[in-house]
Image: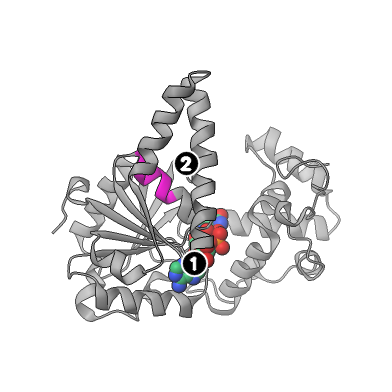
Amino acid sequence: MYATGADVKRITVIGSGLMGAGIVQVAAQSGYNVTMVDLSPDSLSKGQNIITSSLRRIAKKKFGEDAAAAKSFIDDVHSRIHTSTDSTQSASESQLVIEAIVEHLKAKQDLFRALDNASPKNTILASNTSSLPIEDIAKSVSEERRSKIAGLHFFNPVPQMKLVEIIRIPETSEEVYQTLFNVTKKMGKSPVACKDTPGFIVNRLLVPYMMESLRLVERGDATKEDVDTAMKLGAGYPMGPFELMDYVGLDTVKFITDGWYANGKGIKGDKLVGPSQLLNKLVAEQSLGRKSGKGFYSYEGVGADKKS
Ligand code: NAI
């Protein structure tokens, strides 16, 4: 069994989108050999581009004008990254598989079933899901694999955000937890442990906070600008809740709260996460936040990182 992070030699990351590419990068930067998997060569090259841009920013900070040192750093990280469109073949050669595909339960269950069949018995299968119960994903794997299943929840942007939540289902073994703890420490992260409860730690607190901010504005108690200013200057938060929702994506906030309100274990039907008219209206208009150029604030013509 892989009791220490050092026993993990190759990590497969499935899904090379925003999160998957970030996880591949931090794993390769910390010395792991990584296979990045996606459905098509086109998606894989998008993932490679995300990694290269991020490494360039890091190299610039680290090496300034020394172009040769920057190139050697970037090439070194890339030399540990392999790409593939075959998830089962890649998983069969890895000790740890981290899934970061689309947030659809059936897609994840189908993938985990295939990975379970193809992987050696000790391979750990972890999911980066934000909102789906790990136990539901684990329903698709064999009894013997259950002890090797966990959640490994990274935060966006992965290279910068220090936290990883390690989610244990009742069957997750202590050895698997320790391995994930050691691997994420080796990646330079600060892991915390949580049971398989909706939102884990961070989102369980953040999502009701965002929803309560919406209610405050819906009731006419304060403006969104004043709520954002208040939380930044009064609570020391780097972003106000409306800026945060624009950053996360309003469709994502709605997807999570709708799911919890309908089915969330221990939070189903709780008015804390009940529907918000203001949120529903913006999502229906496709005002989804930074990614669509407009959410609570407008980002058109000012770059995706600034608001007007
Ligand atoms: P994304 O949409 O940027 O990337 C998903 C990638 O998975 C795409 O490249 C897609 O082609 C690929 N994919 C889909 N099905 C696949 C399959 N069967 N096999 C291989 N590749 C497949 O999504 P993003 O934002 O990177 O999210 C991925 C996961 O991470 C989701 O479960 C999400 O909930 C979770 N997450 C997202 C965060 C965020 O801020 N975006 C934060 C933390 C977790």
Residue 84 or residue 265, whichever sits in front: 84
Residue visible at 49% across and 50% down?
48
Question: Which secondary structure lies at badge 2?
Answer: loop
Residue visible at 63% across and 34% down?
236
Q: Is residue 253 above or below residue 298?
A: below
**246 in magenta:** no
**Image position, residue 119 (x, y; %):** 23, 70
User: Can residue 80 be seen here?
Assistant: yes
Residue that numbered label 2 is attached to:
159
Q: Residue furthest top?
A: 65
Residue visible at 63% across and 63% down?
252
Going by the numbered disc 2, the residue's amino acid type is Pro
The reply to whether discs 2 and 1 touch (Cβ–Cβ < 8 Å) is no
**Image position, residue 18 (x, y; %):** 54, 54
Disc 1: residue Cβ within 8 A of ligand 1's nearest atom: yes
Residue visible at 73% across and 39% down?
230
Q: Residue furthest left?
A: 1
**Mark found first going from the N terminus, 2 or 1:** 1
Would residue 101 appear left or right of 206 to someone viewing this image? left
Would residue 250 appear left or right of 46 to someone viewing this image? right
The secondary structure that most of the magenta stretch takes on is helix
- Where's the C terminus, which quadrant? top right
Q: Residues within 10 Å of mark 1 (few under 14, many from 20)?
A: few
User: Can residue 132 be seen here?
Assistant: no
Q: Residues within 10 Å of mark 2 (few under 14, many from 20)?
A: many
**28 in magenta:** yes
**Image position, residue 194 (x, y; %):** 37, 57
Disc 2: residue Cβ within 8 A of ligand 1's nearest atom: no
Label annotation for residue 40: 1
Tell me which segment is drawn in magenta.
23-29
Question: Which secondary structure lies at badge 1?
Answer: loop
